[in-house]
Image (cartoon, rainbow, N blue to C red):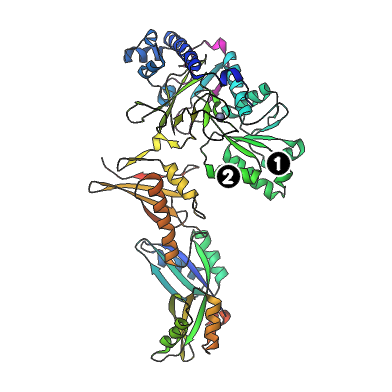
Amino acid sequence: MKVEQMSVFLENKPGALAEVTRILGEAGVNIRALSLADTKDFGILRLIVNDNEKAKEALGPKGFTVRKTEVVAVEVPDRPGGLADILKILAEARINVEYLYAFVQQSGENAIIIFRFDETDRAIAVLAEKKVRILEGEKVYAL
Amino acid sequence: MIWNEELETLPREELQALQLKRLMATADRVYATVPFYKKKFDEAGIQPADIKSLKDLQRLPFTTKTDLRDHYPFGLFAVPMEQVVRIHASSGTTGKQTVVGYTRQDIDTWAELMARSLAAAGAQKNDIIQNAYGYGLFTGGLGVHYGAEKLGAAVIPISGGNSKRQIIIMQDFGSTVLTCTPSYALFLAETAEEMGVDIKQLKLRVGIFGAEPWSEKMREEIERKLNLQAIDIYGLSEVIGPGVSIECLEAKQGLHVFEDHFIPEIINPQTGAMLPYGEKGELVFTTITKEAFPLIRYRTRDISVLYAQPCKCGRTHVRMERVSGRSDDMLIIRGVNVFPSQIESVLMNIEGVEPHYLLIVDRKGNLDTLEVQVEVNEKVFSDEIKNLQVITRKIENDIKDLLGVTAEVKLVEPKSIQRSEGKAQRVIDKRKI
Ligand SMILES: [Zn+2]
């Protein structure tokens, strides 16, 4: 039920993001979703790709620090209040959302949102109980 | 064990009387035999006969590494070559090597000091000493070797390198004492691990490590990984080689300087003024028994502190604090003396952080700024910004606590800090003063 996300440390300097995407492109890795969080000094690029191992093998030797994290891909109904409903479920269960970002592609009629929780397993259980649809990793990488 | 009970525990007044007598003799001799010293004494307006107390040492001129290089190779020898029985040279990383000579008496003195050192570290006659310091022009190998023989221990002159063989010999010969650089000790521990050798099965008891700076944290690591007591030894070839000072096993706190042979001083590296015990500054040594290569007030560039508090081992000789940096590297930031090695020790004490850093000193308006760039690695990297900010704040706070300066810590990509051959460039000073 979990999705593996790659995080890459980036210095805040021109071209850093472009370089990562170029290296991944040359290695034949497809980026499925991406978000960049930054401060004035550094940034963290979070990626969902079709092949984590290949991505790590491509970035590691180039000196990038890469880390894998487990996140959850949630299907959110593409209607007003769709996301708010899910956040409400999580808030009631006192689960913290560390961050979230949207997937480019949709899953049928629904949008896909990547969530990073403080308690991943409990979050999955809570959402499943409320019949919120969660996507398997394999399905997400292949979207 | 104290090798030379009489001299190593001499009451301080008697020790100082002996130092004065030997200093006066040394000053007489260098003035008469080494033109360089005669010229320097004359320029400073002091004659050997003016030395009437140890305080007068302050009036003598300093000798620097540059002076040694300028008289390459034998220009500062105080005896004719027929009396020289050994020549060593220091590895010159920049420019010419510095060359030192020994008479037969000097070799005996050195062996005595190394026997004292080994004994202070807890080595005895029945020990098997695996000497993994390099044999050659470098003083480490032969210095330990002669001291071990004098002590009566069995010395294995294995020299450095060939790490697998080192481990096999440790096992087969039952070595009880290891002597090498601290970084090589760690490397040997890793080698043993790779070979599947259980360190606990080895007979190693004591390790005597020196010839490069190391930290308390490294000591803990070595002691844990090699299952031995790690003792710090200090020396430099210009002064005699290893055996200028050593920690005693009893206290493991500060290195006793063999004061009946060397007079240590701490000076302010900027002004040259002698500093009292307890203050941090540059170590200076005057040799008072050496024949072939006596040195007057030699500036080591090593930063340390001297303290004369009595030690529980019974030795009366002053102790010097573990060398904490080089005066060449010292930065003055907003009036505070900062050594890159101090920043390094802050980083080494934070779990997961590696001591790869770059200091960038600048001046904004009238205020000095210090930026510390620290490489991120997989251990500290996180997908969450706040976790990385916790680390940068922690480093900033620790630097502030330890050094008293405000630094801005910036995380950078690994390997983005330039590494030159072996020695990393640690400081960029952009201030235009
Ligand atoms: Zn002691």
Please state, as top left, top right, bottom left or bottom right, where the N terminus of chain B lies in the image.
top right
Residue placed most toward the observer, B62 or A92: A92
Q: Is mark 2 within 8 Å of ligand 1?
A: no
- Residue name at image x 52 percent, y 24 percent: B317
Where are the magenta residues, as a range?
Answer: B71-97
Q: Which residue is mark 2?
A: B220
Question: Of helix, strand and loop, which mostly describes the magenta segment?
Answer: loop
> What kind of residue is marked 1?
Ile
Please state, as top left, top right, bottom left or bottom right, where the C terminus of chain B lies in the image.
top left
Circle 1: element type: helix
Vertical relation: B63 (above or below) B341: above
Q: Is mark 1 within 8 Å of ligand 1?
A: no
Query: Badge 1: how crowded within 10 Å, few (<14), some, or many (20+)?
Result: many
> What kind of residue is marked 2?
Glu
Q: Chain of mark 2?
A: B
Q: Earlier in the sequence, mark 2 or mark 1?
A: 1
Q: Chain of mark 1?
A: B
| Discs 2 and 1 lie in a common subunit | yes
Circle 2: element type: helix
Magenta segment includes B37: no
Residue placed most toward the observer, B402 or B71: B402
Residue B411 in picture, x, y percent from top left? 41, 57
The residue at the far left in this view is B365
- Residue name at image x 49 percent, y 42 percent: B421
Vertical relation: B262 (above or below) A47: above
Q: Which residue is mark 1?
A: B167
Magenta segment includes B94: yes
Residue placed most toward the observer, A2 or B65: A2
